[in-house]
Image (spheres, grey):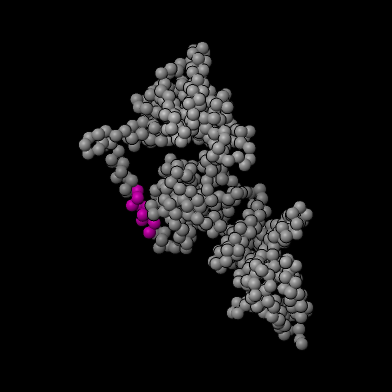
């Protein structure tokens, strides 16, 4: 049992099987095999290992030719690892004596060795864990072949563990199968934190090295109360956490009873509390919780959830859902705030490899370059604005010119809609994010 | 000298970075097909020279003295081969 401390960024407790998100997402499909399948599984393992060795030998040849013998030597070492009699013996013993599947057995044995190396207190040896991880991925690829399960095809609830989660990854997760998140890096404003908050599931970030120490299928406790991840917990710990889970639910229920109370200070100053949302489905829940409106609707997820462009009708449908939940209160819709860290699959041409995600063509600058898409979004926002107090907000404005261009585009769209005889709200309030340093200086 | 008695030899690590991944892999490669057993000892620890994973757990920085031990047919040859590897710094430096 191993406890890794981190930062709890979304509360709650989750107990479940780990899904380790690596560069290639291999979920170990099953941990055990039937007793009478053992011989066949051992054969399957040996075959996969043979293929792995051939593949590595090929890599060694190419690496030596292109990069020199020293580089090729690493692959020779990997070959020795693949053929290591102790490892093979241990894996086969797990399959034969404990009915582990080859994938689960291999993962267990390799991770144990990775752990041993890390415990030697020698940085060089500890770094070799990456070689083991590489070998594990390679072998799993051969073992799983066509049966490789991708993140999008989860069929049971899991706790997702990763180095970090990109917005694209989180946007495409099948939400009903994710119990919570744990990442090696990150903080309160990480994407992981925002998404977990929106989904109301626990998340713990900045856990440090964990991906190398957990096998897909391991039992994991995600403690979003104290900020911990517990790998392979013992019975006593599991019982304790189930108890906390129950207590957390009770507290949550009690909080629900506070919803209807007004948000007021002791001297009766009314404070308006508005919600931030990523998905239109959250709007109803926000209303139930007593929000005074939507302070920020981050529309990026509309773009990230799908591999193709969203039509005006699709934008409109999403915005309508939100406005219908708050017909008499403000709803602020922020236009596309995409940067290189959030690349929708439908727009690859705008993102060359290696671009610094903090600079360059992002958010409003991207919108002003890609006017067709920008106008589609603006049309939908203007049209939905007849249904309530809808306001539009532009992100990452850094100069007066940018603001004027954005507003001018908005007016162009208004003229188009006017000509087409489509209903929209000309009196829509326009705002912008004050987030770039130049802005308060210019104000 | 019967085929069963272990042969042994002391060698010292002359690699600047100690016995790291590539030298370990050269050892494992050399002894892989040897029909008998080969052990490398450092103080109380003994590792199976046919297993690169076992070899990696040896802490053997520059200057460490290790004992090579082999049993079986051809044990003396394999010890010679291994000692030569250490002597030539595994052809790395």
Q: Quick check: is A242 in the magenta stretch?
A: yes
Q: Which residue reaches farthest front?
A: A441
Tell me what residue is drawn at x 36 percent, y 31 percent: A293
Q: Is residue A316 visible?
A: no
Tell me what residue is drawn at x 47 percent, y 62 percent: A2
Tell me what residue is drawn at x 21 percent, y 36 percent: A267
> Count of labels shown?
0
Q: Tell whether A180 sits left or right of A62.
A: left
Give residue A59's quadrant in the image: bottom right
Q: Is residue A429 visible?
A: yes
Q: Is residue A109 above or below residue A159?
A: below
Q: Quick check: is A313 in the magenta stretch?
A: no
**Magenta span of residues:** A240-249
Q: Which residue reaches farthest left?
A: A267
Q: As rendered, which of A296 and A139 lies closer to the eye?
A: A296
x, y percent for residue A349: 63, 33
Q: Main secondary structure of the magenta part?
A: helix
Give residue B93's quadrant in the image: bottom right
Q: Is residue A427 above or below residue A58?
A: above
Give residue A71's quadrant in the image: bottom right
x, y percent for residue A72: 73, 58
């Amino acid at each position: 049992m191993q406890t890794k401390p981190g930062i709890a960024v979304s509360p709650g407790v989750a107990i479940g099987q780990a899904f380790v998100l690596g560069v290639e997402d291999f979920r170990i499909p099953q941990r055990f095999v039937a007793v009478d399948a053992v011989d066949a599984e051992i054969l399957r393992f040996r075959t996969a290992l043979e293929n792995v060795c051939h593949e590595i030998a090929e890599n060694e040849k190419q690496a030596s030719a292109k990069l020199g013998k020293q580089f090729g030597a690493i692959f020779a070492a990997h070959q020795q690892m693949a053929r290591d009699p102790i490892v093979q013996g241990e894996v086969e013993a797990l399959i034969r004596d404990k009915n582990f599947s080859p994938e689960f057995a291999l993962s267990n044995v390799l991770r144990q060795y990775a752990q041993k190396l890390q415990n030697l207190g020698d940085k060089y040896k500890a770094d070799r864990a990456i070689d083991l991880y590489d070998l594990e991925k390679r072998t799993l690829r051969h073992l799983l072949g066509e049966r490789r399960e991708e993140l999008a095809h989860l069929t049971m609830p899991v706790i997702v563990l990763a180095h970090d989660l990109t917005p694209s990854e989180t946007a495409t997760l099948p939400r009903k199968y994710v119990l919570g998140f744990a990442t090696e890096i990150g903080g309160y404003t990480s994407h992981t934190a925002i998404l977990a908050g929106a989904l109301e599931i626990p998340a713990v970030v900045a856990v440090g090295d964990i991906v190398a120490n957990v096998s897909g299928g391991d039992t994991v406790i995600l403690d979003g109360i104290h900020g911990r991840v517990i790998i392979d917990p013992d019975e006593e710990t599991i019982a304790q956490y189930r108890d906390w889970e129950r207590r957390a639910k009770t507290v949550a229920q009690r909080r629900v009873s506070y919803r209807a109370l007004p948000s007021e200070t002791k001297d009766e100053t009314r404070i308006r509390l508005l919600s931030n949302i990523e998905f239109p489905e959250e709007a109803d829940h926000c209303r139930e919780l007593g929000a005074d409106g939507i302070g920020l609707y981050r529309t990026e997820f509309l773009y990230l959830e799908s591999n193709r462009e969203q039509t005006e009708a699709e934008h409109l449908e999403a915005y309508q859902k939100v406005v219908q939940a708050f017909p008499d209160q403000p709803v602020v819709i922020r236009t596309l705030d995409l940067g290189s860290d959030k690349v929708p699959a439908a727009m690859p041409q705008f993102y060359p490899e290696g671009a610094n995600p903090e600079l360059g063509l992002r958010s409003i600058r991207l919108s002003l370059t890609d006017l067709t898409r920008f106008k589609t979004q603006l049309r939908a926002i203007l049209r939905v604005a007849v249904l309530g107090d809808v306001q539009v907000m532009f992100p990452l404005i850094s100069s007066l010119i940018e603001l004027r261009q954005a507003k001018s585009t908005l007016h162009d769209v208004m003229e188009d809609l006017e000509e087409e005889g489509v209903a929209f709200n000309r009196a829509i309030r326009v705002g912008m994010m004050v987030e770039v340093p130049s802005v308060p200086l210019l104000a | 000298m019967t085929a069963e008695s272990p042969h042994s030899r002391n060698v010292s690590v002359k690699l600047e970075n100690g016995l790291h991944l590539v030298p370990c892999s050269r050892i494992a490669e050399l002894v892989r097909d040897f029909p008998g057993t080969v052990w490398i000892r450092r103080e109380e620890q003994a590792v199976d020279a046919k297993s690169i994973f076992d070899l990696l757990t040896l802490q053997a920085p520059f200057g460490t003295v290790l004992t090579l031990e082999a049993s079986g047919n051809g044990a003396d040859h394999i010890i010679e081969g291994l000692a030569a590897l250490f002597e030539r710094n595994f052809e790395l430096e």
